[in-house]
Image (spheres, rainbow, N blue to C red):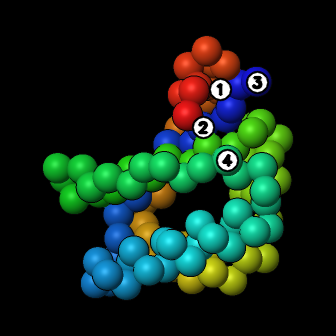
Amino acid sequence: MSRFVEFVTYRVKDTPEEEFLRLRSAAVAAVEAAHPALVAVPVLARRPDGSWVDVWVYETEDDARAANEDAANIPAFTDFARVLEGVEIEAGAMPHLAISPR
């Protein structure tokens, strides 16, 4: 089975890094609870320009769309989103054979 991956890039507004990371962790947990088809959020990396890239993996594109459409109804996610700016999402299907066997 393939997966659907979102590569989300953004900048963090004037928020201490610890607070940003706490908000992100709470958002991930809340989205996972509301949308079990969120398979993993395995990568968060700061880029050399100070922006971040976040990787969200869903079972299908429809699952990703449903989670995105529901985001405004998940308080922990909206708290997280408030500290972000310049959000861009690049997404695509991940072939079945590319999935790690672990």
- State whether residue 65 appears in this view: no
- In the structure shown, which secondary structural element does the residue marked by tag 1 occupy? strand
- On the image, the x and y values in percent for residue 46 come to 27, 55
Q: Residue at position x 79%, y 67% from top?
A: 34
Which residue bears the numbered disc 3?
1
The image shows residue 93, relative to residue 58, as above or below, that is: above
Tell which circle, 1 or 3, labels the residue nearer the N-terminal end.
3
- Closer to the chain start, of discs 2 and 1, is 2
Look at the numbered discs 1 and 3 and tell me whether their residues touch, using CB distance below 8 Å.
Answer: no
4 or 1: tag closer to the N-terminus: 4
**Residue at point 60%, 50% (across, down):** 40
Quarter of the image where the N terminus is located: top right
Q: Nearer the viewer, mark 1 or mark 3?
A: 3
Q: Which residue is mark 1?
A: 93
Task: Report x, y in % for residue 82.
Answer: 51, 79
Q: Amino acid at mark 2?
A: Val
